Amino acid sequence: MYPYVVILAAGRGTRLRAQSGNLPKPLIHVQGEPLLQRTLRQLHEIGLRNFIVVTGYRKDAVEQCIQDSYPNVSLIHNNQYEQDKNIWSTLLGLSAVPENRSVLLVEGDVIIADASLEVLRTLRQSPVSVWTACGHFLPRHAGGIIKAHTSPMLSSSPEECRNAGIYHAIHEITYSLYEPELADWYKNLGIIYIASAQRPIFAQMLRTYAERSLDCYYMTPWAEHLDKLPSDMLDLTETGGASFNTPEEFAAALRLLQLTPKETDQSILPVTFIDIASLRHIEAYDPQRVEWLTAKIRQEGVWTTPLAIDEQHHAVMDGQHRMEAARKLGLRRVPAVLFNYQDVPVRSLRPDTHTVTPEEIVTRALSGNIYPYKTAKHDLPQERLVCHIELDKLMREE
């Protein structure tokens, strides 16, 4: 019997928000497809049919994304998502599953490689729960980690699983930042097969912990009662899977899984904060547009488009009007994405009168002898940069 699938899609994804704006993390595009739709499609392709998605932040957007392609998915809203660290979302999802059914619990920010799908399908044969991992704990990692026995697994695993990677009984689970002594641990991937016999035990633990505080990761009850919930671990390093919290981690996950972004994807480029006093114009601007833009940003109370900045000299590649608006608003810092002129082609919009080269742009920016309005055009790798930063934050020095 195939397990129910519970997908956790309630969180804000705050560490991505500076780049993704108000887009929920599960809706970030992967190869032209929202991640949540991609996960539903993949699991549907291997025979899974019973899906429960727990929503929270921007539930309207998440629900619309699902219903466009999978109208029969069950939706549960977690109205405590602001305080929750997935312990309440997990409990809500498990409580909606019929008795005596196993569950495949999937975090909404996990990217599953197609090669791992068949392995996940075979997990339903396991009499004990199985936590998945994505290789050893590395310096770039943080979060849930697993220590596995070198002895064989608790269950007699399917041959497909044995061939797919390391499959051992779990010795310990914890949550940690990287330390060298933890290098032999494995990084939790965020996909757990919960055996039917263990599901009610885990659900009761979740309820007990949630009654104390929602500021608790869902894996904590399991980690602290592993004696009551013995489990196996399956390492999917060979077949592929990755999770992410930051723009850098998202980019690394795509590289690891060899997923080339499409032009329609929501590009995730790291946004940083630049002291406005260090910025340099490269061309003139329209004062009337600056006044209009200043009023618009002041009314909205948020900054939604980062400047594109030359990382070496802080010349403003794109955002002359935004730079002046920031000054009028009294901001100390502005959101920016840093680029190198080696990676950004530039051309002249006035080829008959002005030659534009990176060297000339920098020379003019440093001297103050800037180009006329609308002269230089930078062909940035991402046409539309987005962020969502409260103005109050940009007025403070940090």
Image (cartoon, helix red, strand yellow):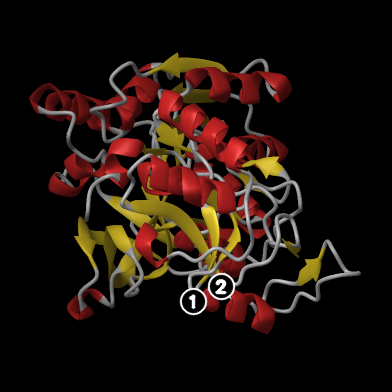
Q: Which residue is denoted by mark 1 in the rendering? A: 313
| Amino acid residing under circle 2 | Ala
Write the residue at 59% across / 81% down.
363
Residue 136 drawn above or below residue 254: below
Q: Nearer the viewer, residue 338 or 290?
A: 290
Write the residue at 19% across / 43% down.
220
Secondary structure state at the residue bearing disc 1: loop
Q: Quadrant of the C terminus?
A: bottom left
Q: Is residue 303 left or right of residue 293?
A: left
Residue 357 location (% of width, % of height): 73, 79
Residue 152 location (% of width, % of height): 35, 68
Secondary structure state at the residue bearing disc 2: helix
Write the residue at 23% across / 47% down.
396
Q: Which residue is denoted by mark 2 in the rendering? A: 365
Furthest-left residue in this view: 212
Which numbered mark, 2 or 1, is in the foreground of this view? Answer: 2
Q: Is residue 157 visible?
A: no
Residue 353 drawn above or below residue 123: below
Structural crowding at the residue carrying mark 2, measured as other residues with C-alpha within 10 Å and reported as few (<14), some (14–19) or many (≥20): many
Q: Nearer the viewer, residue 350 or 27?
A: 350
Q: Quadrant of the N terminus?
A: top right
Q: CA distance from mark 2 to mark 1?
A: 9 Å
Write the residue at 59% across / 76% down.
340
Q: Are dots 2 and 1 in contact, CB under 8 Å?
A: yes
| Amino acid residing under circle 1 | His
